[in-house]
DNA sequence: TCAATAGTGTCTTTGAGACACTATCCG
DNA sequence: CGGATAGTGTCTCAAAGACACTATTGA
């Protein structure tokens, strides 16, 4: 973005970037999906102190030559094997005591993926990488561990997850992010289930269908979903500019 | 937030925070107000390279022991003399080339203030600290300099200003941030002017008044604004919990 | 009295919810 | 045929826009 101007060159060469103490900067990615009628978050068991053995969001240091979003995509690929999905910057958490080692400022991202896109390899499972359903407990969203109890996450990652859910819930109604949680083809009822899961309330069927169809963001395909009962028409998401998903 | 656990202590003591190269972290504050039927942004002329002589947002390095929000409030006070105003984290800009000196990641904040709260001292004016009206040019928001032409700002600060305006515009209708741009007492027409200025369109008077009054966020006072014509009732902003502004 | 702004009453339009209805599949 | 889900027609209600109207001041 910013290109050095000729008159700045001399100053730049004499600039000493070690003059100030610098915090560490990391990215953490809150990868969310919808499955089994619940929002689910991808967590990873920590193998090193601090918080060894506790669950945390995938994350890592930002390298000196990569953008924040590039760092988030790299971390996502390295730690979960997922690529080319919806990713949005969420919030930057910088409380001086959020990491007991040293000053670490983390730029948190939310990522959304249809659950079919994530293949948990045996090797990943060995690292205790898995989906945690999220339940609303006393007004706070918390991932539920295998024991059925709410997990306390490492660092301030519990707060990051809560913030991510707020963001997704808020943007659900006036953006098209819901489609990022669905496969390429889906039925109107499937979109409605995604909305109902995230908003945690039932929606009126007729009004919901009207709204989606009148928004002009889906296109019917020739296929239908069969299985037991009346088959349901399949749709694809189309961007406002007319582009379809790959 | 995160308190060190006993079992982490040994690890913490052996941790070397110089192991990784660290970027610099700054905060930049986009201080906005409404005056003369325009959104205005506070800019400051740079006295050092890079971009010496160009205008930029107030900003500065985050100290190792202060939170991001504390840093933003400190910068705001040091560079503009303003304290105790609405402040909200906006977005973190971290393109590797956004600062030609070295890697600088900046956490941008939006701040809102009623224009009467800002007193530009002679000393501040000598530093070329002043309000720039913002105009929409070719879909992009840009501050208009004294010459009447759109100013190109230092670094990526033009992008920060655009992002800030988008944020304020988006939150105007479903939050109470508009009141942060008004003095303690105001008329309904004055609120409407703030909305119209930020949204850049006329609003229907009857519907607007209904909406504000039915939202229950203002309380009439005994005073009225006189001046030439029919006096207008004065109102105060009341939080949902009933608290009034100081 | 007039100009100018404050403030109101009411009709229309729009979109969401409620709810009952029809349609189509499988067993 | 009956159970189950897909999909529709229509009534009601709430909120926003349009617009015309009344109210109150100072000059």
Image (cartoon, coloured by chain):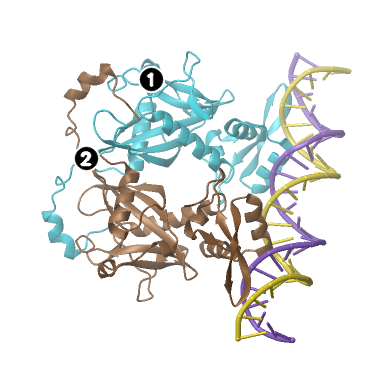
Chain colours: A brown, B cyan, C yellow, D purple
Q: Chain of mark 1?
A: B
Q: Residue at x 37, y 67 (%)?
A: A131
**Residue B124's disc number:** 1
Residue placed most toward the observer, B178 or A196 = A196
Judged from the image, the secondary structure of the residue bearing numbered disc 2 is loop
Give coordinates of residue A194: x percent, y percent: 53, 63
Residue indicated by mark 2: A22
Q: Tell me: A154 left or right of B142.
A: left
Q: Residue at x 33, y 28 (%)?
A: A2
Residue placed most toward the observer, B243 or A32 = A32
Would you say residue A69 is visible in this rendering? yes
- Tell me if residue B60 comes above or below residue A82 in the rendering: above
Mark 2, Cα crowd under 10 Å, few <14 / some 14-19 / many 20+, is many
Q: Disc 1 and disc 2: Cα gap in Å?
A: 29 Å
Q: Which image quadrant for residue D13?
A: bottom right
Give coordinates of residue B88: x percent, y percent: 43, 41
Mark 1, Cα crowd under 10 Å, few <14 / some 14-19 / many 20+, is some
Judged from the image, the secondary structure of the residue bearing numbered disc 1 is helix
Would you say residue A137 is visible in this rendering? no
Q: Chain of mark 2?
A: A
């Amino acid at each position: 973005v910013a290109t050095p101007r000729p008159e700045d060159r001399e100053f730049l060469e004499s600039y000493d970037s070690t003059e100030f103490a610098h915090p560490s900067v990391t990215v953490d990615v809150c990868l969310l999906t919808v499955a089994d009628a619940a929002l689910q978050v991808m967590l990873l068991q920590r193998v090193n102190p601090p918080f060894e053995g506790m669950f945390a969001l995938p994350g890592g240091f930002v390298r000196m030559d990569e953008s924040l979003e590039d760092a988030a995509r790299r971390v996502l690929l390295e730690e979960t094997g997922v690529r080319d999905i919806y990713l949005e910057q969420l919030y930057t958490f910088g409380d001086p005591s959020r990491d007991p080692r040293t000053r670490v400022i983390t730029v948190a991202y939310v990522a959304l993926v249809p659950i079919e896109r994530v293949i948990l390899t045996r090797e990943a499972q060995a690292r205790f990488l898995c989906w945690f359903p999220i339940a609303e407990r006393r007004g706070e969203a918390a991932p539920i561990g295998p024991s059925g109890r709410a997990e306390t996450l490492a660092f301030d990652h519990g707060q990051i997850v809560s913030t991510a859910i707020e963001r997704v819930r808020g943007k659900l109604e006036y953006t098209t992010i819901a489609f990022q949680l669905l496969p390429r083809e889906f039925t109107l009822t499937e979109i409605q289930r995604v909305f109902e899961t995230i908003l945690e309330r039932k929606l009126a069927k007729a009004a919901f269908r009207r709204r989606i169809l009148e928004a002009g963001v889906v296109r019917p395909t020739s296929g239908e979903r069969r299985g037991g009962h009346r088959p349901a028409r399949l749709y694809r998401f189309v961007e406002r500019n007319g582009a379809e998903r790959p």
